[in-house]
Image: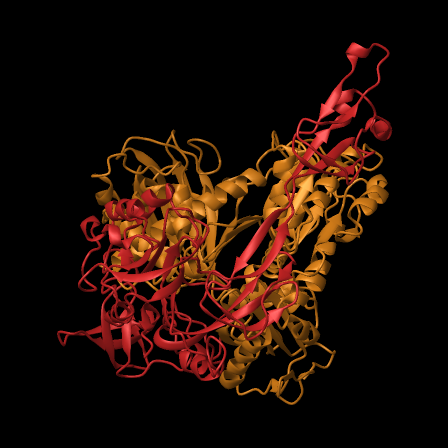
Amino acid sequence: MSGPSGEMTAILATDCGSTTTKAILIQKVGGEYRQTFRGEAPTTVEAPFDDVTRGVLNAIQEVEELSGRRILEGEKILTPAEGGRGVDIYVSTSSAGGGLQMMVAGVVMAMTAESAQRCALGAGAIVMDVLASNDGRPAHEKIERIRQLRPDMILLSGGTDSGTISHVVELAEYIRAADPKPRLGGSFKLPVIFAGNKDARNRIQDILGDRTALVMTDNIRPVLERENLAPARHKIHELFLEHVMAQAPGYGVLIGWTGAPIMPTPAAVGLIMEQAARQQGLNLLGVDIGGATTDVFSVVDGQFTRTVSANLGMSYSISNVLTEAGLEKIQRWLALLLPEQDMRDRIKNKMIRPTTIPQTQQDLALEQAVAREALRLALEQHKALAVGLKGVQQERTIADAFEQGEGGKSLIDLYRIDLIIGSGGILSHAPRRVQAMMMMIDAYQPLGLTRLAVDSIFMMPQLGVLSQVNERAATEVFLKDCLIPLGSCLAAEGQAKPGEPCFAYTIRFGDGREEKGSLCFGELLRMELVAGAVADLQAEPSRSFDLGAGKGRAVSLKVEGGVVGLILDARGRPLSLHKDPSERPAQLHAWAKAVDLYPE
Amino acid sequence: MSSEFRTRNPEPGTRNIGVSMAHSYTPGLRVTPRTVVRKRRILPIPGQVLVREGQAVTAGTVIAQTDLPGKVHTVNVVNLLGIVPEEIRRYMLKREGDMVQAAEPIAENRPFIKWLKTRVPAPITGTVESVSEVTGQVFLREPPKPLALSAYLDGHVVETFPGQGASVETVCSLVQGIFGVGGEAVGTIAVAVAGPEEVLTPERIVESHRGTILIGGSLIGRDGFARAKHVGVCAIVVGGIHDLDLKELLGRDLGVAITGTEQVGFTLIITEGFGRIAMARKTFDLLASKAGRRASCSGATQIRAGVIRPEVIIPLGERSAVSGQRSEKEVSKAGGGLKVGDQIRIIREPHFGRICRVSDLPADLRLLPTGSKARVLEAELDDGERIIVPRANVELLEA
């Protein structure tokens, strides 16, 4: 039942993923919102079912069975919540069928084309290709490329308002010549959003009006010094619902059930991360490592950036991690070396049978080694895009990923990242939480003091879409039920010879206990500090090392605990792995033992 | 959180398994001596359908055809002539829709001094598609390329889609593989090994295998590939391959499992996985029993959304009474769950590739050597040994 002030008391949210549809029930308990029950079922967007609502209903039925609460009447969701039955609102996200796939075009690669890319990424899309007048490809190659790709929509930008129009018109002519077809619904016209020079609109209409479903919106770069991504991003979401979702099997019905527009899954994840960062005043880095793709999100000084590494993942794309990282990079994390042929065959077998799970320690270590490389590569790609506009006024809003060509300062200063959030099966389902923490520490190599957390059951998409209609419920559940705090990591930047001092520390726990010690270069230490506990940490690095205050300068910090505790990392930055492969297993064993990484 | 809330939130180290996911094994690949397969054959762009419902077709019958639009080439006429875009039409020798031959002038300027005259030649033979007064570009399109869509199967047309294509149906034996490379192929089934455990070595591939769909045993290596290509084998079906040999065959590392367009000289289908793995006895016996029969096959594989598995289809030459690749009964059976006594294949280390029977299905979560808790089954190997395997790591071998 809705509360006395008309507040919602029961909320149902689903995320229709490529393979699984996940439903969560959120209820108001003792004045606060908590996630109480969840259910899941295979997604049914493909044959033999061809109807996404089957999977949604199955997942809701599981919630009903577990909660004892009646939510469905036949195939209808009971609203509002009344007398212990029904829900006040139902919301959903979707990435089924490969999510939102876009192609973007702009005149200059480092300017409007990149603005278009940031806009599409921020809207939750996978960008299939970035086309620009100066991308180095001859015209016929561009046209052939547009024709071959079958995106869900194209975002065309180019030219500042009142600037020249010929270049953006040229891009439109290429699109017309290619006559591209949409990915879904072969007989429909491909949606094209024009967000370029407003003076070119008539020309663009003449060229593309009859061949495509053309939509005009405000210029994403009205002047060179300013980006205006929000209007185009909203158009992307509108067209996602009208053209992409409406043509996916069953979505026409699903749209009728929801109390807020269905969002692309990554857009919803970005939304909840941005809101949490804003409310807590944090700089955060988030990653969602899936089977096919890895999304990286960052919120630094309130500025949100999203990138997606479309072919880095742990099942469908696992083999591509091997291709991109190379064999040696994966092997360097393995204490027990595997012959190349065996390792390659195991990775390919995971690719072709993506739902299998490691049964042996060796298999688990291999998957976690691959994950370290996938996380590292995805962050590298993110860093390349997450750079600030240099000396230029910025106008950005939530979900506007941005980047600005060469010369912009990177936003990802690891000393300034307060919290790293990991999500995705390999992190959320790691047999020991310390494994998730070490995968992220090894891959990201945080500097100074950083908190780490994992998403318990990947409910960020549902919370993101919910935040549009009930921000309080979404944020409360995000902080209380979604995130599992792993703990904190203090890491020193610098290099020395093995055995040389790195830093000394003194920790004063809440109960008055005090612990002192020192770490030599190459050492790792794990200390218990439970979730919710806070301790005072003073650390003094030797002259070659920096803990955030400068080389050799002491730091005084408040550290927060978690299910893993506190990790003191004196292995150096960049992380120093033994160059001799025969010596490395002993080093990896020592580190694993220090943090109790694997069963003995 | 209060204990009154029963949640399915997994404890650390457990997999996410709900009621509806209780049967969380990988649905088996189909290996069946008799079924009905229906293939929807659709042109990439609208065209002309050449068959009618009820018509008998062979794999090579062209059922629909269309003209694929030619490639587009651009010529920046205004730059070449040193004029402004608004004036371009005054300098054009050809108009939209005109045919042009390669090297034929499409535009020229008219200088006072004749020898300063510049002509812009057409880079291709084709048609003038458009002339832009904004950018000064001229778009030329190559002539269309005809595309003929074959039936792929020996069978009957059961449905036509005007302007798009048709559905072809056949009563057949069907073997689905786990992974393949290369596109559609049609040939005669030949068996090159005595049993499913044997390796398809180069010596076993002989001249008479030209044009065949060649059935091997547990493995084929790079030397076998080279021999098969030399002989002109149409397709190879084996239990496993090594990834290093696949890399050599493709000339690159395969990153993402979307295949079907590779041109490696033959179509390759593996039935079990990567490594040396004996082909399942049932699969081998079925294929061996069809030696000498004509079959269609495809290596096209897609693991993600819209799963496509490679296949060998051996038409039985009968008309079907029941249509559709999978009857309703079959679909529900596929989702019906594992039972004690079911034959399964283990699809992950440490018993990867073993075929055994389910001996117990404990309901509770069990601790794995990795420290994870997962839903498992107990299986009995041929030698009577009983092993514990996560349910996610087995595949039901369909009866």
Above or below B38: residue A215: above
Q: Which residue lies furthest to the left in this view?
A: B383
* Quarter of image, res A3: bottom right
- Of residue A440 and residue A237, the one placed in the foreground of this image is A237
Q: Which colour scheme is used?
A: by chain
Give the residue drawn at x 83%, y 44%: A201
Q: Nearer the viewer, residue B397 or A386?
A: B397
At a point 70% along the width and 55% down the height, the residue shown is A190
**Which quadrant is the C terminus of chain B positioned in?**
bottom left
| Residue B284 visible at all | yes
Image position of A263 (left or right of B252): right
Residue A95, percent from left and from top: 57, 62
The quarter of the picture where residue B160 lies is: bottom right
In this rendering, is residue A149 above or below B196? Answer: above
Residue reaching furthest bottom?
A83
Q: Position of residue A380 (x, y in %)?
A: 49, 41
Q: Colour of chain B?
A: red
Comparing B116 with A264, the one in front is: B116
Q: Position of residue A136 (x, y in %)?
A: 61, 31
Residue A230, percent from left and from top:
73, 50
Instruction: Evaluate whether residue A301 shows in this view.
Output: no
Q: Give the chain ID for the orange colour.
A: A
